[in-house]
Image: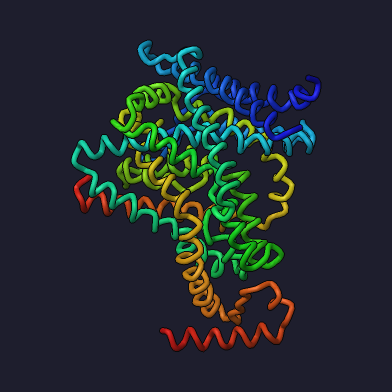
Amino acid sequence: MREFFKDWKIHVLCAVIALAAELIGVRKFSITASIGFSLFPMLYAMAIGIVLGGCRLFSMETMKQASSYITISVMFLTAKVASGISPGIYDIYRQGKLVGSGLALILQEFGNMGTALLGLPIAVLVFKMGRAAVGCTLSTSRESTIAIIGELYGLDSEEGVGVMGGYVTGTVLGTVFFGLMASICAHTGFFHPYALGAACGVGSASMMSASLGALEVEFPQMAEQIQTYAYTSQALTNGDGMLMSLILTLPMTNWLYKKCARIRGIDTEVTPTAEMVTDSQGLTAAGQSDDQEGGTEK
Amino acid sequence: MTRLVMLLKGWCVTGILAAICNYIYTLRMNNPAKVVTPLEAVPGLLLMLGMIIASQLCHKLMQKIAPSVKAPVVLYITLIGILITAPGLFPFSGFVYKSIGKISLLPLCTPILAYAGIGGGKDLKTFKEQGIAIVATTLIALFGTFIGSAIIAQLVMKGTGVI
C-alpha cells in the first residue's frame, strides 16, 4: 500500500495546477478587430508546470515520473478524439458535403510538408544552419520523427541534433505556440474555421488540442464541425505521418537543403549514414556523386 | 512499481480531474442547460476507459500473435473509437457518442497538460542550451505544417463548395 502512494506528490501537484488553471478560465485579448488571441486553461496548466519546474520547486525525479504519466493520461484525449470522428463524418455526409470535405481532408495532409517548405530555406539561408536544419524541419520533431532520423542518420549526427533540438523546443513551447498561433490565425479572418480545423491535426495530441481549443473559443457556434475536421485530420496524420515523412518529405527536404546550400555557397554534404561522417574521403566522394546525380535529374 | 499500477493511478487521477475541470468549465458557460456535474460525466469517462483498456489488450494480443506488426496503442484506440460510435453499426453507438460528448475537449486537456507541464521542466535545461536558430526554426516549421494544411483545406473546400 505504501508503494502505491509513493508518488502522491505528482498527482497532488497535477490536481492543484489543473484546478488553478481551470479556475482562471478562458481569457480573450484583442488588440484590434483583426488582431488578437485567447488564452485558455490547458495553456496555463502547461506554463505553470514549466515555470515551477524552472524555479526548481520540484526534483528531477518528480519531473521524470510526471513525464511517464503524460502518455497514460493522454489516452483519454485519444479516446475522446476517436469517438468524435464517425458521428461527425456522418453529419457531413447528411449535409451532402462528404466528397468535398473528404477531398480537403486528404489533400491537406500534404500541407504537413510545409514544415520543410517554409522552415528549411529560412533555417539555411537566414540562420545559416547546416544539416541540422534537415532534422529540425523534416516534420514536427515528435517521437516518430526522432525514430526516422535516428534510424537513417543516427542521433549523434547533425540531423540528430536538429531533431532533438526541435523535440525539446516543441515540448517546452509547442502547446502555447499552437494555441496562440491558431488563435491569431482565427482572428485575421483569412481562413474559414473549417479549414483551420482541418489544419489542427498535426499528429501531436497536445498541439492539436491547443490549436483546436483556440478555435473553439473563437467560434463556439461551429465547435462541433471544427472538431470533426480536426479529429479526422489528426487520425489521418497519426496513420500516414511516418510514411509521408519517409517517402515524401525527407527527399524533398534533402533536395531543398542542397538548393539552399548552393545559394549560400557551401558544399552540399550528404550524410546518409553515420559511418560516412567519420570517413572524410568518402564524404567528399559521396557529395560529388550526389551533385552529379542531381545535375542529370534536373 | 509495475506498469499496471501506474496505468491505474494515471487513469484514476486524470478521470477524476477531468470530471471536476469539466464541471467548472461548463459552469462558466452561463447556460444552466449545459452544466455537466462530475457525476454526469462518469458514464462517458468509464466508456473512454473501456476503450483504452480494450486497446491495451489489443496491443498486447497483437504483440503475441503478430510481433512483426508494430502498431502503436493510439491506432487501436482510434479504430475502436471510430467503430463503436459509427452511427447504426451498434445499437449503443448513439449512447457512447452522447456520453463522451458530455466531456468537453478543453477541460479534458487541462490535467493532461498539467502532467506535461510538470514533466516539461525536465527538458528546460536542454532547451536553454539550444541556439536561437534551432528554436526559431522549430517554431517556423510548426507554423509551416499548420498554415500549409490550412491553405490547402481552404482552397479545396472553396473549390468544392463546402464553405
Q: Please state which of residues A38 and B87 is positioned toward the viewer in this rendering.
A: B87
Q: Is any part of residue A180 visible from this angle? A: no
Q: Please state which of residues B135 and A108 is positioned toward the viewer in this rendering.
A: A108
Q: Residue at x 58, y 19 (%)?
A: B16
Count the marks: how many?
A: 0
Q: Residue at x 62, y 31 (%)?
A: B114
Asked if B45 appears above or below A193 in the picture, the reply is above
Q: Is any part of residue A236 visible from this angle? A: yes
**Residue A77 in picture, x, y percent from top left:** 50, 34
Asked if residue A17 lies left or right of residue B48, the reply is: right
Q: Please state which of residues B95 and A285 is positioned toward the viewer in this rendering.
A: B95
Quadrant of the rendered structure where residue B100 is?
A: top left
Asked if residue B39 lies left or right of residue A186, the reply is: right
Which scheme is used to colour this image of the protein?
A: rainbow
Q: Quadrant of the N terminus of chain A?
A: top right
Asked if A36 appears above or below A259 in the picture, the reply is above
**Residue B108 in picture, x, y percent from top left:** 51, 27
Asked if residue A170 lies left or right of residue B81, the reply is: right
Q: Residue at x 32, y 47 (%)?
A: A190
**Residue B93 in picture, x, y percent from top left:** 35, 27
Asked if residue A132 lies left or right of residue B106, the reply is: right
Residue lying farthest to the front in this orientation:
B65
Quadrant of the rendered structure where residue A284 is?
A: bottom right
**Residue A16 in picture, x, y percent from top left:** 65, 21
Asked if A154 appears above or below B54 in the picture, the reply is below
Q: Quadrant of the C terminus of chain A?
A: bottom left
Q: Residue at x 47, y 69 (%)?
A: A252
